[in-house]
Image (spheres, grey):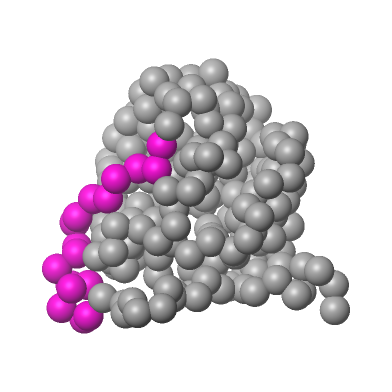
C-alpha cells in the first residue's frame, strides 16, 4: 500500500455531532456562510457556492462525500485530514476558502449565469483587498462562465486576478465521477508544488 492509498478518503464526523436534519437542510436554501479568509494567504480556494449541508452547518465543503478535505490532505496542503468543522485552522497554513456565488443551493447548476458573473466581480474585489498569492477555483465550468473563459482548462491560467496567480481545480463534489479521490489529490498536489509551500 502506498502512502497515498493509506490516507483516509473522507473526513470523519466529530464525536457527538450529527448531520443536519432534512428540515434543517431545506431551511438552508439561499443562506450564505462566512469566508475563511485572512490577508496575504498563499492560496485562496474558491468553491462554486455553498451546498445545503454547508449552509446548515456553516462549514465549507461539509457534505459527506465531498472530497475537498481529503484532496487538500492528499495534495500535501494539510498535515492531517481535517474535518470541515476545523476550517478555521486553514489560515495558519496560509489557506482560505470563499465561493464564486454566496447563495446556498442543493446543486451548483441551480445558479444563474448572472450570479456567476456577479460572483466573479465580487471575487475580484475580494482578491484585490486580501492579496492572496494564488486563487484556485474549484470547478472549471463555474470559472468558464463567471470569468467568460469558455475554453479554460484545468491547471494554471494565463491571466491573473487582481495580481494573484490563477489555477483551476476539478470540482471535488461526489457527483463529479470524472475524478477519483486519488486523481483529485494529484490535481491538488500539482497546485501545491507550483505554490512552493513548505510541507505542513
* Rendered-image quadrant of the N terminus: bottom right
- The image shows residue 161 at horizontal and vertical percentages of 51, 25
Question: Does any portion of residue 145 appear in the rendered image?
Answer: no
Question: Which of 182/87 is in front?
Answer: 87
User: In the current view of this chain or complex, which residue is farthest to the right?
Assistant: 1
Q: Is residue 7 left or right of residue 64?
A: right
Does residue 9 sit above or below 80 in this rendering? below
Return the residue nearer the eye: 160 or 40.
40
Percent x, y of residue 147:
45, 34
**Can see residue 125?**
yes
Please give left or right for residue 110 compared with residue 97 in the image.
left
Q: Give the residue drawn at x 19%, y 56%.
A: 30
User: Vertical placement of 7 versus 167: above or below?
Assistant: below
Q: Is residue 32 magenta?
A: yes
Q: Residue at x 35, y 52 (%)?
A: 49
Q: Is residue 31 left or right of residue 1?
A: left
Residue 120 in picture, x, y percent from top left: 38, 34
Along the line of sight, the residue nearer the viewer: 154 or 96: 96
Q: Count of labels shown?
A: 0
In the image, what residue occupies the spot 68% across and 46% down? 200
Magenta stretch bounds: 21-37
Image position, residue 139 (x, y; %): 51, 52
Q: Is residue 88 left or right of residue 94?
A: left
Q: Quadrant of residue 23?
A: bottom left
Q: Is residue 180 magenta?
A: no
Q: Image point 22% across, 80% down: which residue?
A: 21
Examine the residues drawn in magenta and state their main secondary structure. loop
Amino acid at each position: 500500500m502506498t502512502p497515498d492509498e493509506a490516507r483516509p478518503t473522507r473526513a470523519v464526523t466529530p464525536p457527538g455531532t450529527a448531520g443536519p436534519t432534512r428540515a434543517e437542510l431545506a431551511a438552508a436554501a439561499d443562506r450564505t456562510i462566512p469566508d475563511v479568509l485572512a490577508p496575504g494567504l498563499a492560496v485562496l480556494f474558491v468553491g462554486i457556492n455553498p451546498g445545503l449541508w454547508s449552509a446548515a452547518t456553516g462549514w465549507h465543503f461539509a457534505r459527506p462525500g465531498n472530497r475537498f478535505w481529503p484532496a487538500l490532505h492528499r495534495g500535501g496542503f494539510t498535515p492531517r485530514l481535517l474535518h470541515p468543522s476545523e476550517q478555521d485552522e486553514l489560515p495558519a497554513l496560509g489557506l482560505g476558502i470563499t465561493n464564486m456565488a454566496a447563495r446556498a443551493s442543493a446543486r451548483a447548476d441551480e445558479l444563474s449565469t448572472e450570479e456567476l458573473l456577479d460572483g466573479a466581480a465580487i471575487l475580484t474585489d475580494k482578491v484585490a483587498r486580501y492579496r492572496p498569492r494564488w486563487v484556485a477555483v474549484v470547478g472549471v465550468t463555474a470559472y468558464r462562465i463567471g470569468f467568460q473563459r469558455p475554453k479554460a482548462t484545468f491547471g494554471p491560467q494565463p491571466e491573473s486576478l487582481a495580481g494573484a496567480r490563477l489555477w483551476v481545480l476539478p470540482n471535488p463534489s461526489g457527483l463529479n465521477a470524472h475524478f477519483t479521490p486519488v486523481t483529485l489529490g494529484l490535481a491538488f498536489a500539482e497546485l501545491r508544488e507550483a505554490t512552493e509551500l513548505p510541507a505542513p
